[in-house]
Structure formats: structure tokens, C-alpha cells
Image: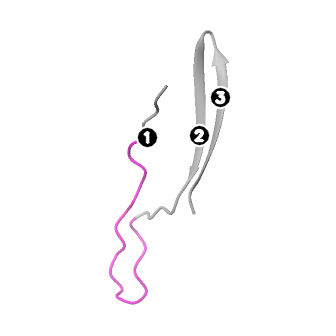
Amino acid sequence: MSSIKIRTTRLDGNTQIRTLISHPMEHGRSRDKTTNKPIPAHYIQVLTVYP
């Protein structure tokens, strides 16, 4: 299950956004237990923030 925690801080008229995103990540070194084939890597690559 994915979850997102967001913290914001105002700095000199700007807003700093810090996120902690938990998701089911695969690093590309694991193998499928039934087929023994490598499980491809899966990372968060794009994060879009709208005002």
C-alpha cells in the first residue's frame, strides 16, 4: 500500500515541500520465486506538483 507524508515550511516568501513517499519498489535484483526470472526495477521517476 502506498502512502505520502507531506511537510511544508515557509522560507523567505517561498514554500519548501518535503515528502516521504512509500510505495512497492523493486530494485531490479530480486527474482520471481516461481520462474526464477529477474523482476524489473520500478522506481518513482516523475513527481508533478501543482499550485
Residue 32: give x, y in percent of width and height.
40, 81
What residue type is disc 2 on? Thr
Q: Which residues are the magenta region?
A: 28-46
Residue 10: give x, y in percent of width and height.
65, 18
Label 1 or label 2, whichever comes before in sequence order: 2
User: Residue 19 bears which disc, if any?
Assistant: 2
As rendered, which of 18 and 4 lies closer to the eye? 4
37 sits left or right of 21 in the view: left
> Whole-Å distance between the Cαs marked 1 and 2?
11 Å
Residue occupying the far bottom of the picture: 34
* Residue bearing the label numbered 1: 47
Which of the 4 image quadrants contains residue 40?
bottom left
User: Residue 8 bears which disc, if any?
Assistant: 3
Image position of 21 with respect to 48: above or below: below
Q: Is residue 33 magenta?
A: yes
Visual colour scheme: one colour
Screen quadrant of the N terminus: bottom right
- Identify the residue at image location x=40%, y=90%: 34
Residue 6: give x, y in percent of width and height.
63, 38
* Circle 1: element type: loop
What residue type is disc 1 on? Leu
Is the C-beta separation of discs 1 and 2 under 8 Å?
yes
> Whole-Å distance between the Cαs marked 1 and 3?
16 Å
Q: Residues within 10 Å of mark 2 (few under 14, many from 20)?
A: few
* Circle 2: element type: strand
